[in-house]
Amino acid sequence: MNRLKMIIPPMPWHRPRVRVNDGERVVLLHGLWRSVWAMEEPARYLHDCGFETLNLPYPSFRQSIDKIVDHVAREIGPSSKRTHFVTHSMGGIVLRCLAKRHPELITGNVVMLAPPNQGSEIIDWLEDSPLGRMSLGPGGMSLSTNRLPREVPSFDGSNDVSVIMGRRNLVSTFDFLLEGENDGIVTVEGGHVEGIKRLEVVDADHTFIMGEKLVLERIAELLKY
């Protein structure tokens, strides 16, 4: 796992990365302020497992959630293949909105990695400052614990949805905001939302959970249910 590549910030020239294969399709969605590089490790791994993958960048902080969902829906498009989703952090929130507005695009299973399904205490803290609001953008601001539960729909039970949360906190910067087990950014409890089938906890941190070998193996297992 090349950790430096995984934290490359989003750039205007980043484009979706498609790996064609005979198997079912997997769409991968990164988190806030991340780029297509964040999900390259699981994309490569799943392709090696026989899946066709679409690693899809999106404007996580520049646009509102509604516009992000429109963008993602256009990029995914219809497919004759069963289509699964693997998301990290904010990508899971985008998917929840996509599932409500475009359920026809989600024809397979869902695996959410470290999603702030109850909103983020860190966003709450940052949105109190002008600099914080500027850095978060309209996309990031929608992740507050006040807005997210009110504005983002839960799952309706149509899909097999799994949540994998981390419990390894490598950086103590936000410890004063987080209660209970957490990955340094999101609490384990915060991963719960109505409509999921299972929630599992692994020894991983928020930033690099998608590159952990045990997580990659579990994702592949869950997509084959």
Image: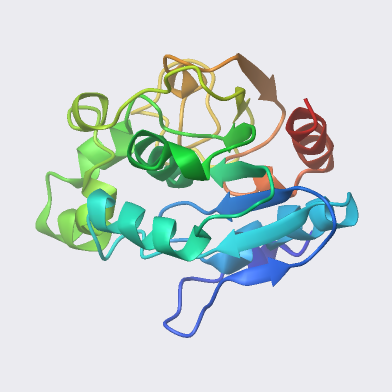
Q: Quadrant of the N terminus?
A: bottom right
Give the vertical position of 110 relative to 61 (above or below).
above
Q: Residue at x 87, y 52 (%)?
A: 50
Q: In which quarter of the image is the C terminus?
A: top right
Given residues 200 and 74, the one toward you in this image is: 74
Residue 149 position in % (x across, y down) = 25, 24
- Left or right? Give the position of 119 relative to 45: left
> Which image quadrant for residue 101?
top left
Q: Can residue 7 be seen in this view?
A: no
Give the vertical position of 129 relative to 215 (above or below).
below
- Left or right? Give the position of 84 relative to 100: right
* Number of numbered callouts drawn: 0
Residue 151 position in % (x across, y down) = 21, 31
- Left or right? Give the position of 106 relative to 86: left
Given residues 61 and 204, the one toward you in this image is: 61
Q: Can residue 36 be seen in this view?
A: yes
Q: Which residue is drawn at 46% across and 46% down?
A: 91
Residue 35 position in % (x across, y down) = 51, 66
Given residues 22 and 35, the one toward you in this image is: 22
Q: Residue furthest bottom?
A: 13
Q: Which residue lies furthest to the front in this view?
A: 80
Q: Which residue is drawn at 52% across and 54% down?
A: 30
Give the vertical position of 181 relative to 184 (above or below).
above
> Which image quadrant for residue 167?
top right
Q: Which residue is drawn at 80% across and 38% down?
A: 220
Residue 145 position in % (x across, y down) = 25, 28
